[in-house]
């Protein structure tokens, strides 16, 4: 990614990368959503909604996406599984909850991977990128690696994506090739520049100036 990710920017980039037929294995459905409540526990009094937590981004494979959007929330019981990956982007007002309350809720409902991105570079979470996998009911941190491009990061086993922090920016790489993915707008901009270059070359060859 080419900038500190807002929720929308993060979601759009992941949607582009995780499209079936790109580098990601095929799944019948992939839900990538921002600010979707995850319900847990029993419904509230007088038929009110059950307790819930709202992550910055969640990813769920092979679920009924239409039903989730209709409910305006993710119910692990109705979907027969928790979200596969949850991502939080740290801020002064949220990082304490991300580190303690939300982490414990995600652990209890069985979210397999929990990722935290720290736009401050480490002030909120102690390191720019913090990824954890659920092992025997407890979260275990993915090792933070140093790469040749002077970035640091870790790899999601579920998404097969390498999240990195370099030059005060978050980036997403293919862990096999090392290539960096870009936001769709960045791809389109490069394509437009290349098209303009080719059109100018054609005009030059035609003697059109």
Image (tube, rainbow, N blue to C red):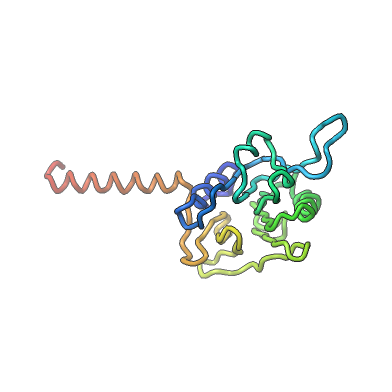
Residue 75 percent location from the top left of the image: 72, 43
**Residue shown at the point (70%, 49%) measured from the top left:** 80
* 70 or 144: nearer the viewer: 70
Residue 47 percent location from the top left of the image: 83, 31
Residue 96 visible in rendering: no
Q: Is residue 173 left or right of residue 38?
A: left
* Image: 95 above or below 71: below
**Residue shown at the point (68%, 60%) measured from the top left:** 130
Number of dots carrying numbers: 0
When asked about the image quadrant of residue 128, the answer is bottom right
Residue lying furthest left? 207
Residue 44 percent location from the top left of the image: 85, 35
* 200 or 32: nearer the viewer: 32
Residue 150 percent location from the top left of the image: 54, 66
When asked about the image quadrant of residue 134, the answer is bottom right
Residue 70 visible in rendering: yes
Q: Where's the C terminus, which quadrant? A: top left
**Residue shown at the point (64%, 37%) measured from the top left:** 67
* 21 or 77: nearer the viewer: 77
* Image: 194 above or below 180: above
* Image: 204 above or below 44: below
Residue lying furthest top? 46
**Residue shown at the point (42%, 48%) measured from the top left:** 187
């Amino acid at each position: 990614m080419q900038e500190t990710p807002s929720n929308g920017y993060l979601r759009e980039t992941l949607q582009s990368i995780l499209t079936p037929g790109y580098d990601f294995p095929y799944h019948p459905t992939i839900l990538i959503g921002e600010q979707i409540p995850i319900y847990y526990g029993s419904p509230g009094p007088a038929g009110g909604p059950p307790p819930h937590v709202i992550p910055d981004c969640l990813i769920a494979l092979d679920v009924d996406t239409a039903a989730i959007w209709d409910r305006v929330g993710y119910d692990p019981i109705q979907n027969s599984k928790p979200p596969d990956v949850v991502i939080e982007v740290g801020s002064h007002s949220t990082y304490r909850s991300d580190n303690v309350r939300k982490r414990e809720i995600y652990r209890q409902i069985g979210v397999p991977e929990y990722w935290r991105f720290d736009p401050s570079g480490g002030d909120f979470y102690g390191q720019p990128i913090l990824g954890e996998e659920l092992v025997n009911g407890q979260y275990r941190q993915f090792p933070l690696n140093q790469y040749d491009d002077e970035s640091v990061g870790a790899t999601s086993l579920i998404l097969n994506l390498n999240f990195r922090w370099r030059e005060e920016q978050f980036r997403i790489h293919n862990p096999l090739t090392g290539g960096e993915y870009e936001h769709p707008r960045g791809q389109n901009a490069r394509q437009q520049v290349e098209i303009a270059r080719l059109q100018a070359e054609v005009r030059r060859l035609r003697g059109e100036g």
